[in-house]
Image (tube, rainbow, N blue to C red):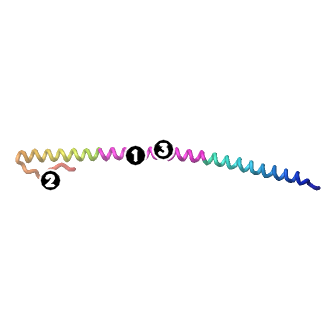
Amino acid sequence: MEFDAGAITTLVSISIGAIGATGGFFIRRADKRREKREAVMEELYRQRIKDLEAEVAASRAAEDAALEKLRHVERTALRWRGQLKAAQIEPDPEDLPEV
């Protein structure tokens, strides 16, 4: 059983082409899956960043509100102290409001 060199070359070329096409198919399929996973992860990270930014903003708003309340109490205490001084009453530090 003898094969012609042209036939052998053709068979080898077709086999290599088939293997290359199959490999290319699997590589493209893997790339598509990877790109889909990356897109999902990217969206997940973007949403997580938005959630964290909202959490930070809420925390800052709460801190600002607490600071404003503290400043209001301090201003009120100073006015109260000023009124006592104007009435020539020496305020007792223990009577000052809790800050």
Q: Which residues are magenta?
A: 35-64
- Of the residues tagged 2 and 1, which is closer to the observer? 1
* Distance (Cα) linking label 3 and label 1: 12 Å
Q: Which mark is residue 94?
A: 2
> Which residue in the protein does label 3 denote?
47
Going by the numbered disc 3, the residue's amino acid type is Gln
Quadrant in which the N terminus is drawn: bottom right
- Residue 58: % across, % down: 36, 44
- Measuring 33% from the left and 44% from the top, which residue is drawn there? 61
The 10 Å Cα crowd at callout 3, few under 14, some 14 to 19, many 20 or more, is few
Q: Position of residue 15 (x, y in %)?
A: 80, 51
Q: Residues within 10 Å of mark 2 (few under 14, many from 20)?
A: few
Furthest residue toward bottom = 1
**Residue 17 as seen in the image, left or right of residue 51:** right
Q: Could you tell me which residue is drawn at 60 percent across and 46 percent down?
A: 35
Residue 55, disc: 1
Query: Mark 3 vs mark 2: which is more N-terminal?
Result: 3
Q: Please name the amino acid that badge 2 sits on.
A: Glu
